[in-house]
């Protein structure tokens, strides 16, 4: 939706961004226009595993938002990045860290943009499984979410509410790949990338958004150790 693209656009003179749908591309263009970065960024609708570009045309490929975890085939996604990169080009990606199976799902009410959902997230056999229930506007819990800060807001709960069923409009399931560092290294090497560096982040992005300065310093100092707790 243009969030990371606005940041990347400050680092280069020309950028081509891909979106998975026309709606996502439209939102990205609007965000870029608002930030005055639209002139140096082209947004196209494309599948990460079937990029509409000639071979060896890019100096770098950058993927944020753990996109490689969400593609149907991570192998095909990396192969496409390798195909469109000039020799000597660089690839920067992030992926979901491997976690052991969860004994019970994490349950949340969320507001993302103008959409209200109830989610149950679990980890099963190295895959994140997220069941997303789209809620009707008369759901009583939405009053609190509407008062939440910003366009994205989440409230965690312990149990699924008994009354939630009558407010569900539709449901979808999303699964994501989770990787151990060794798996990422092997996958990249088999694709053709020669120099592979792994930088563990763990839950660092969430910690860095905290207002607690001491917590931020601790996280930056112990990044590797914190990430290893989940391996």
Image: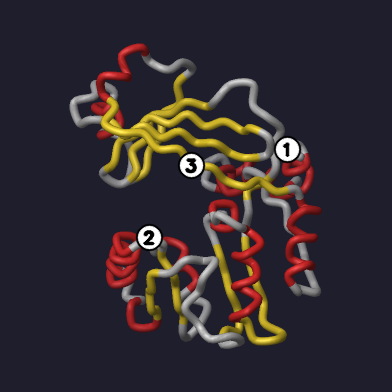
Which secondary structure lies at badge 1? Answer: loop
Specify the quadrant of the image occupied by residue 108: top left
| Residue named by callout 1 | 230
**Quick one: label 2 or label 3, which is nearer the N terminus?**
2
Secondary-structure class at tag 2: loop
In the rendered image, the residue lying farthest to the top is 162
Q: Position of residue 87 (x, y in %)?
A: 70, 86
- Which quadrant is home to the N terminus? bottom left
In the rendered view, does 69 fall on the left or right side of 228?
A: left
Pointer 3: residues within 10 angstroms few (<14), some, or many (20+)? few
Q: Which of the 4 image quarters holds residue 145?
A: top left
Name the residue at 49% across, 17% down: 158
Of the residues tagged 2 and 3, which is closer to the observer?
3
Residue lying at 30% horizontally and 47% vertically, measured from the top left: 113
Between tags 1 and 3, which lies in front? 3
- Dot 1 or dot 2: first in sequence order is 2
Identify the residue position indicated by label 2 in the image: 1
Label 1, label 3: how far apart the Cα atoms are: 21 Å
Q: Badge 3 is on which residue? A: 174
Using residue 176 as the reference point, say whether residue 218 is left or right of it.
Answer: right
* Residue drawn at (38%, 74%) of the image: 43
């Amino acid at each position: 939706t243009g969030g990371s693209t606005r940041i990347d656009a400050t680092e280069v003179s020309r950028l081509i961004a891909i979106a998975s749908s026309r709606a996502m591309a439209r939102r990205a263009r609007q965000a870029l226009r608002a930030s005055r970065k639209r002139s140096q960024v082209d947004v196209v609708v494309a599948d990460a595993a079937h990029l509409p570009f000639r071979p060896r045309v890019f100096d770098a490929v950058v993927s944020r938002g753990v996109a490689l975890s969400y593609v149907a085939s991570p192998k095909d996604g990396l192969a496409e990045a390798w195909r469109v990169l000039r020799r000597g080009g660089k690839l920067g990606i992030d992926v979901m860290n491997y976690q052991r199976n969860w004994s019970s799902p994490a349950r949340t009410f969320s507001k993302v943009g103008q959409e209200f959902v109830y989610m149950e997230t679990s980890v099963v056999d190295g895959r994140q499984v997220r069941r997303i229930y789209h809620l009707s506007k008369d759901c009583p819990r939405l009053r609190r979410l509407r008062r939440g800060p910003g366009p994205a807001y989440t409230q965690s709960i312990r149990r699924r509410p008994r009354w939630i069923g009558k407010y569900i409009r539709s449901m979808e399931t999303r699964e994501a790949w989770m990787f151990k560092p060794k798996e990422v290294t092997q996958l990249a090497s088999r694709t053709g990338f020669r120099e592979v560096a792994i930088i563990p982040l763990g839950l660092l992005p969430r910690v860095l958004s905290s207002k607690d300065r001491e917590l931020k310093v601790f996280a930056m100092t112990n990044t590797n150790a914190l990430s290893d707790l989940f391996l």
